[in-house]
Amino acid sequence: MDINRLRTLREFADRGSVTAAARALHCTPSAVSQQLRALQTEVGLPLIEPAGRGLRLTDAGRALVARADEVLAALARAESELDTYRSAPKGRVRLAIFQSAALMVLPGLLSRVAGIDGLEIDARDVDMTPPQVPGLVADYDIVVTHRDEHAAPFDSERLEIRPLLREPLDVALPVGHRLAGKERVELAELAGEKWIGVASGFPVDDVLHSLTIRTGVRPVVVQRINDFSVTEALVAAGHGIALLPRYTMDTSPGSGLVRRPLAGLRAARLVEIAMRHGASSRPAVATVLDALRAEVDGLVSVPAG
């Protein structure tokens, strides 16, 4: 089978439309359609079919995409073997990372690789939900993503997933709150509180939803803010309480915040690395992965509370 046609099929699978695949491949939609038709002729099976106003993969198409991932990963490994003959990892590593993780690890990560000659990190902060991750993996070498620990895992058949961190979510309270003096708080004790949440579909909102299902206590969300620094300011000003990640919450003197774990409940988000299969075989990518791992290991020293 033609490698370029397999790559076109994978881009269509990752991006969901002919137009989006064409943009990624820097060609016209008609060229993508022609490549897909030629591949169908080559294999003798329909690989795509109409779906509403667009197209989708058939069962045979999905099966071939999985095998195309293996073929293209093998090519990437072959190319990376040539890179190993160089004295040091070189090149640009494209990194997508959600904002609070960037706040936590990006400054240290960039410092760790700053002295490696020829290695460059092109980092972008992306406000991502789990369903967006496959599309991001199509554009970036490394995607640092997150999900509710009770949510379904990412598809490891299409993606290489590496765990990076389990980050507990604690209740952020304003200093002077009636529960601020407790070591832990029960969700039921917060039933009458106003909550500052995040947009629906993001992991912290998923955690609040799962807590509702498990306890029967439905939080009253009065604001939905995705920037945790804004949420911290609102909580400190007494406009509500919030569920926030432990390692990036600012509870230093003068912040106006106290952090309290939930009693009897495990509430956390899983921070994970998502990549295409074969990406980690590039020395430059492997070096950045090692630096990420080292940075997280050095930071996760906050007591469980």
Image: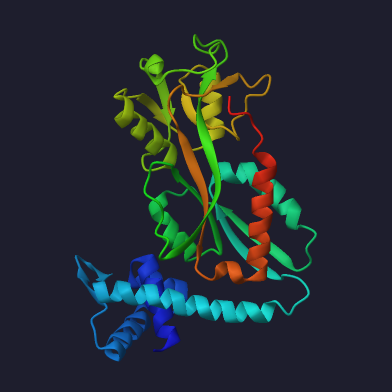
Could you tell me which quadrant the N terminus lies in?
A: bottom left
Kindly identify the residue that appears in the image at 44 percent across and 84 percent down. 4
In the image, residue 290 sits, relative to residue 74, either above or below, namely above
Front in this rendered view, residue 23 or 273: 273
Q: Quadrant of residue 66?
A: bottom left
Kindly identify the residue that appears in the image at 43 percent across and 72 percent down. 23
Q: Could you tell me if residue 26 is visible in this image? A: no
Front in this rendered view, residue 275 or 253: 275
In the image, residue 291 sits, relative to residue 302, either above or below, namely below
Image coordinates for residue 231, horizontal then vertical, percent: 51, 29
In the image, residue 120 sits, relative to residue 36, either above or below, namely above
In the image, residue 208 sits, relative to residue 290, either above or below, namely above
Give the residue at the far front of this rendering. 264
Kindly identify the residue that appears in the image at 63 percent across and 24 percent down. 251
Image coordinates for residue 93, horizontal then vertical, percent: 63, 64
Kindly identify the residue that appears in the image at 63 percent across and 77 percent down. 80
Image coordinates for residue 39, horizontal then vertical, percent: 33, 86
Residue 124 in the figure: left or right of residue 35: right
